[in-house]
Image (cartoon, helix red, strand yellow):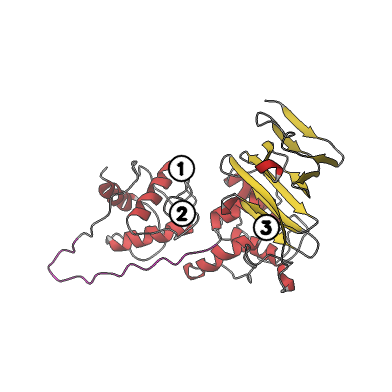
Amino acid sequence: MKKILIGVVALAVMVSPSIASAASNDVSLTTDTVLTVGGINLNVAGSTAALESIEMADSGNSFTVVLSNGSSIKITSADRRVLTNSAPGKYVITDSCTSSVSTLELASYSGTVTVVITPTSTICTVTATPSTSGTRTSTVKKPVAMIPVTTTANNTANQTIASSITRSLQRGMTGDDIRTLQTLLSTDPSVYPEKSVTGYFGPATERAVKAFQAKYKLPTVGAVGPMTRAMLIEIFGTEAPAVPAVPATPATPGVAPATPAIPASPSTGSISRPLKIGSTGSDVKTLQQFLNASGFTIAGSGVGSPGNETDYLGRLTVEAIKKFQAKYGIVSSGTPETTGYGRVGPKTRAKLNELMGQ
């Protein structure tokens, strides 16, 4: 497959419906490039990973970008035009507006995605609150205060602050978003055993970022760029939908508790190994599909919700497993290490496979 390299110096490219890169080519953006779309100049920069194509659409008023796994693209408008796009929310890393520029940043980390980007005639609106750096309130959540995540009760904070990291981070930097990053990484001792939340990106944080990147098959560069930010959002989410607690049914002396009816599960596999937080694989997705279909909802929307199950076992899945275990009298207290609470061990696996019909 031929690769088109856009030169070492900035290059201005007038793109019209009849002039577009062929979909059969890869495009590596090694410098910023100016595209004129619908009479609007846009500055486009890409990651070192290849974009599959950039093509014009809608009679030259839009352009289509095909992002392969590991690709990212950043579009800015010095005219502060609102940039609409067709990407699912999890691929949108930044959609912001300042007093000088509007920015749209996209990244793919789970396969190939095709996105249509349209610059509009609307000027973006800068948020009045200075601390948000001009984030457009209609599309982007405001960063929230850093809250240490140490217990299940703090899970909501953990899920929210993952999306507040809106810039690239590297060694030597300071700020609240560094504290946020350290807080998230500290929830996984295998990644960040020091668990030091200082707001300074030092050697320990760099090691933790590399460990996180290695764990999730990202380039181990030690800096937080678009792909790592996207994976943080994938793992920790952008919001934590409330999952109603399953009330316990009081036991009647001498009467065996009735087994609640379980709706048919869309999953077709079985669970053949122990699973815990951090596990990955198709059986994790099978587990999530079954839990969602059986009333133990992992998330009400977004990653983990019905139809959006993943092959990563995260904290929301752990909470759903706990509810399943409590409902079927397997275990209702303790930790994954001490009692297996929140972990798929032999008893939990046997009950899951029984209800799945395996």
Q: Residue furthest right?
A: 9
Where disc 1 sits, the SS reads: loop
For badge 2, the amino acid type reads: Gly
For badge 1, the amino acid type reads: Gly
Q: Is residue 164 above or below residue 219?
A: below
Asked if the stretch drawn in magenta spans residue 340, the answer is no
- Are the two marked residues, 2 and 1, in contact with CB atoms closer than 8 angstroms? no
Q: Residue at x 44, y 67 (%)?
A: 242
Q: Which disc number belongs to residue 304? A: 2
For marks 2 and 3, the one nearer the N-term is 3
Q: Position of residue 47 (x, y in %)?
A: 72, 43
Q: Which residues are magenta?
A: 239-258
Q: Residues within 10 Å of mark 1 (few under 14, many from 20)?
A: few
Where disc 2 sits, the SS reads: loop
For marks 1 and 3, the one nearer the N-term is 3
Instruction: Look at mark 1 in the image and give the residue it sits on.
Output: 281
Q: Nearer the viewer, residue 80 or 92?
A: 80
Q: Tell which tag, 2 or 1, sits nearer the viewer.
A: 2
* Residue 168 makes an appearance in the image: no
For badge 3, the amino acid type reads: Asp
For marks 2 and 1, the one nearer the N-term is 1
Q: Would you identify the image quadrant in which residue 327 lies?
A: bottom left
How far apart marks 2 and 3 lie (CA) works out to 23 Å
How far apart marks 2 and 1 lie (CA) works out to 14 Å
Q: Residue at x 74, y 47 (%)?
A: 38
Q: Tell which tag, 1 or 3, sits nearer the viewer.
A: 3
Q: Nearer the viewer, residue 166 or 83?
A: 83
Where disc 3 sits, the SS reads: strand
175 sits to left or right of 338: right
357 sits to left or right of 230: left
Q: Nearer the viewer, residue 12 or 189?
A: 12
